[in-house]
Image (cartoon, helix red, strand yellow):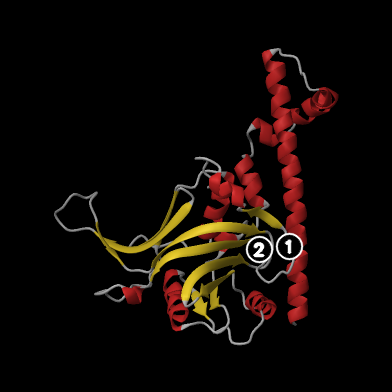
Amino acid sequence: MHSLVAQRARRKQRELIVQKKLSEQKRGEDRKKKKVLRLLKDGKKILSKKLQDQALDLYDKATYDDVITGKISSKTAVLAESEYATAGLKDPKILITTSRHPSTRLSLFAKELRIIFPNSQRVNRGSLVMESIVSSATSSGFSDIVIAHETKGQPDALFISHLPAGPTLCCSLTGVVLRHDLEGLKPCSEKYPHLLLSGFSSSIGMRIKSILKFCFPQPPSESHRLISFVNEDDLISFRHHTFKREKGTDPKGVETEECGPRFEMRPYQIRKGTVDQKDPIIEWSLHLFMNTAGKKKIF
């Protein structure tokens, strides 16, 4: 049974890779078409010899291309071929686990992750191998797996893997403060939270934003929980609050209260496959030279 699920997941991943490659080729062709149309409209000469050879064919295609004429937006076309094309049809279902032999602090962190992610279940890792966990989660209808790791008893890494074919977001964690570390906290509501994702502007940033966004369902309007991922200088600050409006005060003013936990995330890799794959295709990776590349922002 597990082998059939694994084969189906690998087939799905291969299909997505082919679709993505074709989508990239299509977008490249669309850019050339727009360039040819713009040059012809402005009465300018096409300087590129390669583009000159393709210009007539590109012009003929552009005449009947819905993307160029604006009938279909490029955003819709890309979304239809992405791994999250059907994500809005049902609420996400998250499986949460840890590395083997977790410390007490990592176990507490995993319990608090269960509060953060709605519709989530925490599973003790035990002696299970990752291939078995991914296969069982896929066959049980889970949409994502979240795995917490530690070093010397301190949570320091988080993996978010979308099922059945990826992508997988790998993040390092710093400044982890658990709910157990904060004094005087009230019991936390488990209503679906509102989501705040701020500071993501590049293509990689939008990719990370999508991975995080689709881990959360649509909240009801009466929910008073707020989950925020705020990117500043390529460091994503996670915060968890509740809010309320005081009667008789400014309608725009709200009072917030931290629920915990809180931590900082630094994404360092996005893989095209699931977390169990031995040799995944690396979609993006943070290289050492990027840390010293002036003031350029990655996300």
Q: Front-most of 44 and 89?
A: 44
Q: Which residue ends up furthest to the right in the rendered image?
A: 53
C-alpha span from label 1 to label 2 = 7 Å
- Asked if the residue at tag 2 contacts the one at tag 1, i.e. Cβ–Cβ closer than 8 Å, the answer is yes
* Direction from residue 18 to residue 292 in the image, left or right: left
Q: Which residue ends up furthest to the top in the rendered image?
A: 43
Q: Residues within 10 Å of mark 2 (few under 14, many from 20)?
A: many
Image quarter for residue 134? bottom right
Sooner in the amino-acid sequence: mark 1 or mark 2: 1
Residue type pointed to by label 2:
Gly
* Direction from residue 267 to residue 167 in the image, left or right: right
Q: Front-most of 163 and 200?
A: 200
Residue type pointed to by label 1:
Gln
Q: Residue at x 48, y 64 (%)?
A: 173
Residue 166 — which label? 2
Q: Residue at x 73, y 81 (%)?
A: 2
Q: Residue at x 72, y 63 (%)?
A: 280
Residue 13 — which label? 1
Q: Is residue 236 above or below residue 72?
A: below
Numbered label tally: 2
Q: Is disc 2 placed on a helix, strand or loop?
A: loop
Residue 224 visible in the displayed image: no
Q: Is residue 47 above or below residue 104?
A: above
